Image (cartoon, rainbow, N blue to C red):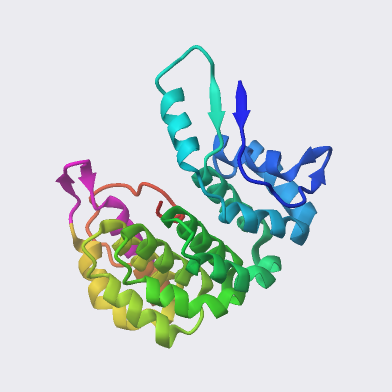
Amino acid sequence: MILLYENQLPADPVYHGRKLSRWLQTYASSSRGSPGWQEVDEAVRNIGTNSVPLLLQLFRARDSSLKLKLVALAGRQRIIEFHFITAEMRHREASMAFIALGDIAKDSVPELIKIFYSPDSSIQSRCAVEDALGWIGPNACPALPLLLQTTTNFNATLRANALWALGEMKVEPQLCVPALVQALQDTNEWVQTSAVHALGMFGTNSQTAIPSLTKLANSAPRFGAGGLVGIQLQFEARKALKNINRVSPSEESLPNFLLPIADPLNPPR
């Protein structure tokens, strides 16, 4: 197998004889909570904030037109196995590392904001930055204007990730809850689901959302072009009502249609 890299990376910290950039690649090949994932988390935590310069550079990664052509050509042949580490993969690796770093990466918030607003940043890079801000949590508060503004972005994935991040931060409910309630009217189901999830994270501060959430919780799943849809949305609405009311929703008011898809909700990408 031939690995093709692009762009000069900053200092690559080492843990147990293995460079951080190599550790991070395991995120793509393992599921969250798996032994492989846990090993990478351990490496990232031990490296700590020394990992941040490399992670920030990964958010800036871009694929040249030549690389994209090579990816397309490689997909048309099976003689030599190429493994291209695309910019989107690097963005994802960096955002996953912020799960392990959490609050200790708070000093990276100003630079993450810069990356988000950079004209060179792709949609995928900006989505990954939103994820990272959510993982940092309340101390990512300086990014609140960015996230609130992005809840009405033209791109549905950017909207959904911004809403999800607001729920993870759980700050300034007087500003965030109205934006989340407004997003319940979005035409994209994942945007709605992210808004519902975030409202649940705000708990009792989301009282104004109860009527809309109750309606969503009572809505039956439906068949769409991709199969049965609305299951996760209904499930998250029930969870949110439980968190807001601090009690389980009434079985009479919330009929059981189907089991949830996943719990907890991850960034909707």
Question: Is residue 228 in the magenta section?
Answer: yes
Extreme residue toward the right, this view = 17
Q: Is residue 141 in view?
A: yes
Residue found at the far bottom of this picture: 174
Residue 199, quarter of the rendered image: bottom left
42 is higher (above) or lower (below) than 157 = above
The quadrant where residue 252 appears: bottom left
Tell which of 229 and 15 is nearer to you: 15
Give the residue drawn at x 45%, y 53%: 124
* Residue in view at x 76 percent, y 41 percent: 19
Residue numbers of the magenta segment: 220-239
Give the percent coordinates (x, y) of residue 136. Answer: 60, 67
Q: How many marks?
A: 0
Q: Quadrant of residue 268?
A: bottom left
User: Horizontally, is 111 left or right of 172 in the view?
Assistant: right
Residue 115 lies in the magenta stretch = no
Q: Residue 157 location, x and y as percent? A: 36, 57
Q: Residue at x 42, y 56 (%)?
A: 123
Query: Does residue 246 show up?
Result: no
Please state, as top left, top right, bottom left or bottom right, where the N terminus lies in the image. Answer: top right
Work out whether 42 lies above or below 99.
above
